[in-house]
Amino acid sequence: MKNSEPTIYDISSPGRKGVNLPIPDVPIEDIPDDLLRKDLNLPELTQLDVIRHFQQLSQLNHSIDSGFYPLGSCTMKYNPRINEDAARMPGFLHSHPLQDINTIQGNLALMYELQELLKEIGGFKGVTLQPAAGAHGELTGIMMMRDYHLSRGDTARNKILIPDSAHGTNPASTTMSGLEVIEIPSDSRGNVDLDILKSKCGDDVVGLMITNPNTLGLFEEQIKEVVKIIHDCGGLIYGDGANMNALTGILRPGDIGFDVMHYNLHKTFSTPHGGGGPGSGPVGVSEKLVDFLPAPIITIIEEGDEDNPPLFGFTTPKHTIGRIKAFNGQFGVLVRAYTYIRIHGSSGLRSNSEHAVLNANYLRSKIEKTYNLPYKRACLHEFVVEGCWQEAPNIHALDISKRLMDFGFHPPTNYFPLIVREALMIEPTETESKETLDKFADVLLQIADEAKTDPQVLIEAPHNTPNARLDEVQAARQLVLCCRPAYLPEPEPMQT
Ligand SMILES: *Cc1c(COP(=O)(O)O)cnc(C)c1O
């Protein structure tokens, strides 16, 4: 699909320049001809042309700073600007991961304290800050679970149980680590079906991956039984912590028997995300798994005293799965999450979760008479409705989402979880005002009305964006990551 916005090549004009290089004060050597590239085809523009072009492109993006962004499961909350001030402090910004540890004690102290805070928040014995995102944390966790069993001579375990409401990264990371996925259906209340769970759990199971609250926004009502069933058959519990915005300060997964869990610092702890990163997915583990953590872990290697601060450094856990990320993780994201946690403190984090849950239930109660709620229960921080009606047979969840864009709202998550037809997954987060929630609910009710009286207005939406309906499958299969002059051939499709 061609973008209707002009590219920087379209506005290029021969002879225009954006820079004035000084006359060189060193002799210009002859450059061998074969080292000179003649096919660069760089666009020719003034500085102002370039600034305006990219400024205008940036304004086509929707962001949490420009409007409501209720993208379920992804926790798009406001990024307090003090996070940015902290991440831009020169000592953090200009440090290099290969510096001698004596010159980066402040950075290591922050990482150490963040490990401690995350241990406290999740109820875990150890934490690694290395994984670059939630999915990477999942892979890290599964590798530790697998090695734990192998180290005990328990070599026949090769299956991971995953509820059918799970995020797609759960089966993907399981498959990537060479294990087999066994899907566990949900029961009529949206919980894991206990009888089926029991029948699938045996001495070939590495463990269960579970999201709580699950991706329907529902608290697993029998979570203690679930944990017991898995532990009784020798398996471990992996918690997908992407939904920690419902629980932070209220429930610690480690306390109810979770053995390992990733945090999405870019969701729960406010680092801005979307568009591909950077994220950060630290992993917390129980006693059983501390020796398997990736290396290195930030540790106090020399205790301090009244006159001297402690010396921070790196240590290697006894049965480590090895290094899973270059250098020390996404340091800038760690600084933002640390700042966020320290600014809010434990009572602030708890109150954020309480308000996230309150906002979701408020919004749910405003629309549930119009949009069918498949599991009729109070939700936690998000909820899922069906984006379809018998009276509007041609309208799909996607049409509702596209129509929402006409009103300046980012669409909710579509078609996930897979067990709800025409799913719309809505997560308002705690940072939105009652006025915003009311306006969003009003628009959703108006759209439901239009679906039945004037469906064409939904089917043709969005009406004011440069592109309306993209071929998302082709966009993912045939990535075009840079703009190219029109006269160059289209790039070869990526082999996937
Ligand atoms: C976002 C999310 C993930 C994956 O996290 P990334 O940081 O995007 O890799 C996993 N599970 C759930 C439920 C999520 O919402």
Image (cartoon, rainbow, N blue to C red):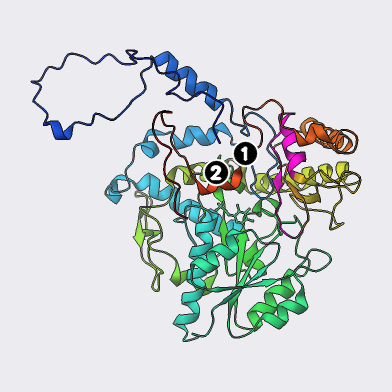
Residue at image position (30%, 29%) is: 40
Residue at image position (62%, 64%) is: 239
| Residue carrying label 2 | 475
For disc 1, the neighbor class at 10 Å (few under 14, some 14 to 19, many from 20) is few
| Depicted 123 relative to depicted 453: above or below | below
Residue at image position (43%, 28%) is: 486
Residue 19 or residue 302, whichever sits in front = 19
Q: Where is residue 6 drawn, in percent x and y?
A: 51, 23
Please give the label number shown on residue 470.
Answer: 1
Secondary structure under the numbered disc 2 in the rendered image: helix
| Depicted 424 relative to depicted 189: above or below | above
Quarter placement of the N terminus: top right
Q: Would you say residue 283 is visible in this rendering?
A: no
How many marks the image carries: the answer is 2
**Badge 1 amino acid:** Leu
Secondary structure under the numbered disc 1 in the rendered image: loop
**Badge 2 amino acid:** Ala
Classify residue 444 as left or right of residue 124.
right
Q: Where is residue 373 drawn, in percent x and y?
A: 85, 52
Q: Which residues are magenta?
A: 398-419
| Depicted 15 relative to depicted 455: above or below | above
Residue at image position (48%, 46%) is: 334
Q: Where is residue 250 drawn, in percent x and y?
A: 70, 55
